Amino acid sequence: MFDYLLGILAFALIGIIINAIKILREYERGVIFQLGRFWKVKGPGLIIVIPVIQQIERVDLRVIVMDVPTQDVISKDNVSVKVNAVVYFRVIEPEKAIIQVERYLEAVSQLAQTTLRSVLGQHELDDMLSERDKLNHDIQAILDRQTDAWGIKVANVEIKHVDLDESMIRAIAAQAEAERQRRAKVIHATGEKQAANELVEAAKTLAAEPNAIQLRYLQTLTEIAGDKSSTIVFPMNLIEQVKKTIS
């Protein structure tokens, strides 16, 4: 009977020892609680946890990639869009991530969703489409500031998609076409203005030199002679001016 009890105790002791031995990987840390109070953070490698007296919570220190579900956002100019994003973060203080917040993964997810809606709702649709880098930085800064008390570092936030309904897509396409037409008209008007200025300068030059206008007229007649036209009219004042020039 004594040997039987001794055997049971031996097996129990072996079970306790095996249960007390924990192996933490390089990217893991163990938050140890002793009699319910925080004691220390251990790991990586082989650690001993005293059963009943101590409890361990494992924490992963690797960068976590979290998808933010699609959110319905109303922009500052009252346009309804659907936006989703991805958040990159990691735990840098394991004890805070366990003690200061319950289920830190869920907490970061909920905070990211509300922050995404809040920040984008303060901007117009054009900003969402053209200033995505600035919006990413603004959301990242807010999340990082609010999760600092949880021992979490938000490294990056990327807005993935900004989805519009069909009517809004058609409206944006029409707006873009109108903008292209406006630019074309401005460029054409600028060209006409420059051409008119050049013509004014040329007229001033010809007016300053009476012989120059006669030479320009002769050049024009030469160009006409190259066409199939069979009749050329010479003004009498031109012939008289040429005679005076020759004499």
Image (cartoon, grey):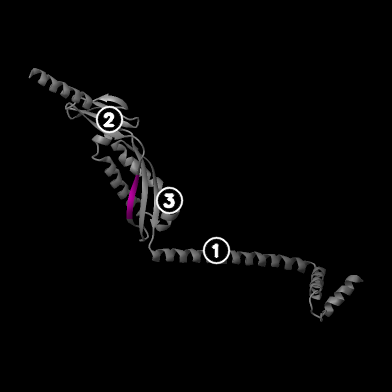
Mark 1: few/some/many CA within 10 Å (<14, 14-19, 20+): few
Q: Which mark is residue 233?
A: none
Please provide percent x and percent y for residue 164: 38, 60
Disc 3/disc 2 C-alpha distance (Å): 38 Å
- Residue nearest the viewer, comparing 138 with 83: 83
Q: Identify the secondary structure beneath mark 3.
A: helix
Amino acid at pointer 1:
Arg
Are the residues flagged by discs 3 and 2 in contact, CB closer than 8 Å? no
Mark 2: few/some/many CA within 10 Å (<14, 14-19, 20+): many
Q: Identify the secondary structure beneath mark 2.
A: strand
User: Pointer 1: what residue?
Assistant: 183
Q: Is residue 208 magenta?
A: no
User: Pointer 3: what residue?
Assistant: 132
Q: Quadrant of the C terminus?
A: bottom right
Residue at image coords 26%, 27%: 22
- The magenta span reads 66-71
User: Pointer 2: what residue?
Assistant: 30
Please provide percent x and percent y for residue 50: 20, 24
